[in-house]
Image (tube, rainbow, N blue to C red):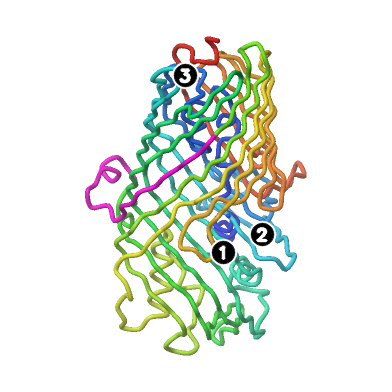
Amino acid sequence: MKYSLLLGTFLWTTSASLAQNLLGISTSNYGGTNRLYINPAFAADSPQKIYLNGIPGNLHANNNYARYQAPFSLFRLLTGAVPTRYKRADGSIQFEPDYTKEMLNGKPKSGTVWGEVRGPAILWRTGERGAFAITSRFRAVGQVAGASESVLSAIRSGLGENVLLGIPSTNNQLSVNTNTYAELGLTYAGTVWEIEGHKLMMGATAKVLVGYNAQHLINRGLDYRIVPDLTNLNRAHLEVTRFDANLGYTTFLQNRALNLPTLLSTSSPGRGLGLDVGFTYVSQYDSNSPAMQLGLALTDIGGLTYRGEEYNYSDIEQKPVTFTNSDFNNLSGTVATARLIQEKLTTNRGPDRTNFRAGLPTSLNLTFDYRLPQGFGLNVTYLQDVRSVWATAIHQPTLLAITPRFETRLVSLAVPVAYLNRGLTAGVSVRVGPAWLGSDNLLGLTGNSTIGIRPRGLDLYAGIAFGIGQGRQNEE
């Protein structure tokens, strides 16, 4: 249990943060359909007549609660390549408590684990002034926002030895959302105003959403204390005396593998619609002069309605409600955890609702881009979460990134530097022909206590995509 809690605290309390924006490729002039997730109007200024996107993937984690300081990297931990000397006799990882270190400053904590696959996509210019795109994407997100430090510390410590006993902790808050869904998008972008050397473009993406899995725990007030287990003085119990929250979950993925038949199943519990809208202004007199671009967009408007159980708690029926170490033994996944909480707090009571809403990570996106004819460029991206901390929705964490780059039709190199979750990350992205590989948090992949780097997350993405023909700006 302690290993799962420690890892879950670091990765699951890690706000979905958007270094998962694939900054090294989405800020590139040759990013094609990957640029549209930041601003759909970028389609109208594509340098290629046709852009074909393969199946790029991205894994991202970030948090502002705990630093990872194990003697092996997060990349090794997630891929199962941990050296044998850090494993038990049965092959499981011996994850010590000091492999994470809290960053305590009295402020609410947030964190995200985000996996994304951008499926096959195509963008094509329909003439001098317009472009269409068809995109597909699969996302799986686990996110914590607005969490009280005392709750996270209790999770990290577990209910074993050396926990603080008998001290009441009151008015703790915690917002947890998970969402696993797929989307199919149709984009149109066109030039709405143009004079010599200046043009204004507008674009929109309409999305159809299918949801497979969602849980939420919106906790507005929790009182608890940790008391000794009188049958085992080396263990303790968690006693909950007040709970003001909403708890909801689906069970569709509980006994199913996440494979193609599951993704295509007509019994998936979630359905919804989404929308992105954006504008971009470009100043460039000809292909031999510098180009400046300003962008404004509102993305991921909308959400999904899920068939599932939702419970509302303004208080608890039996005081106190006790949680023990053994309650969490053999639990697997967020569904089992949500059900355990529900069963502990609810006695012979049906759900208050049999459906609930799960919002998309709506964000306001501002971009500035300047590029020279020789291939050098600089991009500034600002993403602002517009969802309430207590919304039943995943969030786009506020992000400010600066990405210098060099690019041609055949190769590109970008170095994104971002301020995210009150910390700096730095990465690198390389494209050679149709293949690209990158990370928006390079030190997070390799950092460990042995080399003195203690990361707060990781990021990795890769894919294949290529353009065919030349767009308008290359023909001038």
What is the crowding at mark 2: few (fewer than 14 residues within 10 Å), some, or many (at least 20)? many
Task: Look at 31% across and 54% down and name the residue there.
Answer: 270
Residue 471 location (% of width, % of height): 49, 15
Apparent side of residue 29 relative to residue 404 in the rendered image (left or right): left
Q: Amino acid at mark 1?
A: Lys
Picture quadrant where residue 20 is located: top right
**Residue situated furthest left in the rendering:** 266
Q: Amino acid at mark 3?
A: Phe
Determine if the magenta segment contains residue 218.
Answer: no
Task: Look at 40% across and 42% down and name the residue there.
Answer: 138
Q: Are marks 1 and 2 in contact (CB under 8 Å)?
A: no
Of the numbered discs 1 and 3, the one sitting upstream in the chain is 1
Residue 112 location (% of width, % of height): 56, 53
Does residue 276 lie above or below 461 as drawn? below
**Residue situated furthest bottom in the rendering:** 319
Q: Amino acid at mark 2?
A: Tyr
Apparent side of residue 439 relative to residue 80 in the rendered image (left or right): right
| Residue corresponding to mark 3 | 466
Residue span colored magenta: 258-279
| Residue corresponding to mark 1 | 2
Of the numbered discs 2 and 3, the one sitting upstream in the chain is 2
| Residue corresponding to mark 2 | 65
